[in-house]
Amino acid sequence: MHNSRQIKTEMQIKDKTTSECTDYKEEPLLAIKGYDEMPPFFMSLISRDNLWAFISSRGSLTAGRESAEKSIFPYVTVDKIHDNYGTTGPRTIIRLKGNDLWEPFTPHAAKEPDIERTLSKGILGNSICFEERRVRDGLSFKYRWQPAGRFGLARTACLENCSNQTVKLNILDGIANILPPGLDSRMQANSSVLTDAYKQSELQSNSRMALYSTASGITDRPEPMENLRANCAWSSGLDEAAVTLATKVPDAMIQAKAIDPCALNCGQRGAYWLHGEVSLEPGQKKEWVIVLDSDLDAAGITQRIEELDTQDGLELVKDAIDSNAAELARLLASADAFQCGNDSMSQIHHTANVLFNSMRGGVFINGYNIKGEHLQAHVKQANHRLYDLHETALSSLNGWLSYKECRSQIEALNDLDLLRLFLEYLPLTFSRRHGDPSRPWNKFVIKTHDPDGSPCMSYQGNWRDIFQNWESLCLSYPLFLEHVVTKFLNTSTMDGYNPYRIFDSGFDWEEIDEEDPFSGIGYWGDHQIVYLLRLIEALHAHQPEVLNRWLDEKAFVFANVPYRIKSLEAIFDNPKSTIIFDSELSAKLRVQAKEKGSDSALLRSTDASIHKANLTEKILIPLLVKLSNFVPGGGVWMNTERPEWNDANNSLVGNGLSMVTAGHLLRYVRFCRDWWSQLDPDKQ
């Protein structure tokens, strides 16, 4: 999958558009020729670390680190990103001989007939390349976005003279609308004009490093507030060009006016431009790189300048790009992302499927090995009292331990609650929730590395998303199926439903935000029977004795989601309003979880102990709940104000009849019947 051979697969997309797999610097790329003839579309750029980027086929983009709160460009909705060409992201303007002006990739004017455009993406999703050829002049311009590891987001540009004559060009190339840090997504959306007044961009002396910050913290209160962090941009490779930070430079370039050599720009949107005269011999290329990063403190900025403003600076960036790609490939390989066969496109599709599955559900960080210190932290976070009780024994779990060794030490302590927490433990990395701006209600936080740079273990996901990803992942790691089933069952509720979101440190539920039309409450019970069935089918096929062991053992718990199903009479009165939200309990659970650990959000018995159930109960409860809502001749009634299985309408429909769940109920019952009929009652 990683060699440089030409893959000659090609298919027709539209009349003037083709897609093929080609090579670019020995990397297989999927290419769409004439992509600009298509309606604009959206692409994600994948990184092994916490860098995120979403790029429009028009060239504009949003990007940042970790979350929308650490953006390099404004995190806005997809339609606005499509419309932002020329105002946000890269822009290139080239003045040719005879004052002829060439602006590659511009979507605003009618494209000249001899212009050829190609958009390519690497099979790992970590490289997006735009290319435009100006046939009559023999010129080609391309640029490629790639993650550059600890240096941030890299844009490598290349101008090539394919003609047989020397050409002299006046070029402007750079990035528009670079944000300072400290502007959260709500401020970006609602107060962008106000924030412009606070912005300042400053080119560092004797350096190509520019910093983007705010002159002060943004507040309307009469109090001093400093902002001591900055976003940054740095370039290398176009020595003929000077750096200018003037916001309106493209207008000056188009109007053939003098370029403002701005080194300090206050009260305007941040920009980074390279401007100069370039001469290219026949066949010659000129390549340069611009690197952007977010949220650096003073020490980080100083270190970054010392590293990059050297002879080895560009090589450090290239090495970081290569290292990020290699780490991503290794991570995906551990989830069986690469296949060998005669059908190259099928292999590429498989890799893409595993890639996006892994981004949602995560990948096990070190196979079946478990890091003792991280397991200790997991137990302590979940239940402070339980951790204190076993602190001496747990403290002996150090370094990387084999799965069997770690489990045997936990089982030797003979504590079902401790074993439960071990079985809820999933050493995953690379996981994140929806982050794309087409779903602005999905708040994402990408945690892939600890502050010291070592890979960290973390996951988060919406219920209906993450379990389907884990089902596929466990085909590669079947020993963790028991952990996934345990997490599923222990985060389900006594009334047979499940919370909205789960993560490595617990689960979460929705609350109403009166200012957000997408907010609401309700059980996200969609796909519940389907997912549980497929998981226990897989576990039973792999290790049937595991499920048998837990049938009569009260080792499972219930999530205490602060929702209560209304009475039958109340539901008949208003079938679209079925849930009571207990705001007082919600606040209490959140406080207790913070003070005592996430186990505080579990259902309690009358004596305040954690309420327990065996596996038989946990399997029967969702089945009986669905059967109690079965409408003969129709399906299972969705009575929880959220979809049961209705992806066509997604979250907009929370009532109606689900035929998919009804169909799977039959398979669910048959599975349980066949399984339980084979049990030896004398051994149970």
Image (spheres, rainbow, N blue to C red):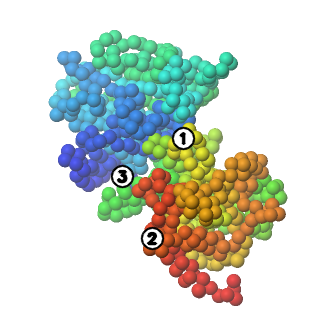
Amino acid on which disc 2 is placed: Gly
Amino acid on which disc 1 is placed: Asp
Q: Residues within 10 Å of mark 1 (few under 14, many from 20)?
A: few
Alpha carbons under labels 1 and 2: distance apart: 34 Å
| Residue shown at the point (47%, 55%) measured from the top left | 653
What residue does disc 3 label? 3
> Which of the two labelled residues, at mark 3 and mark 2, occupies the earlier sequence position?
3
> Which of the two labelled residues, at mark 1 and mark 2, occupies the earlier sequence position?
1
Evaluate whether residue 259 shows in this view. Answer: yes
In the image shown, does 163 or 252 lie closer to the viewer? 252
What residue does disc 1 label? 516
| Quadrant where the C terminus is found in the figure | bottom right
Q: Residues within 10 Å of mark 2 (few under 14, many from 20)?
A: few
What residue does disc 2 label? 634
Question: On the rendered structure, is 121 left or right of 406?
Answer: left
In the image shown, does 526 or 154 lie closer to the viewer? 526
Q: Position of residue 616 (x, y in %)?
A: 65, 75
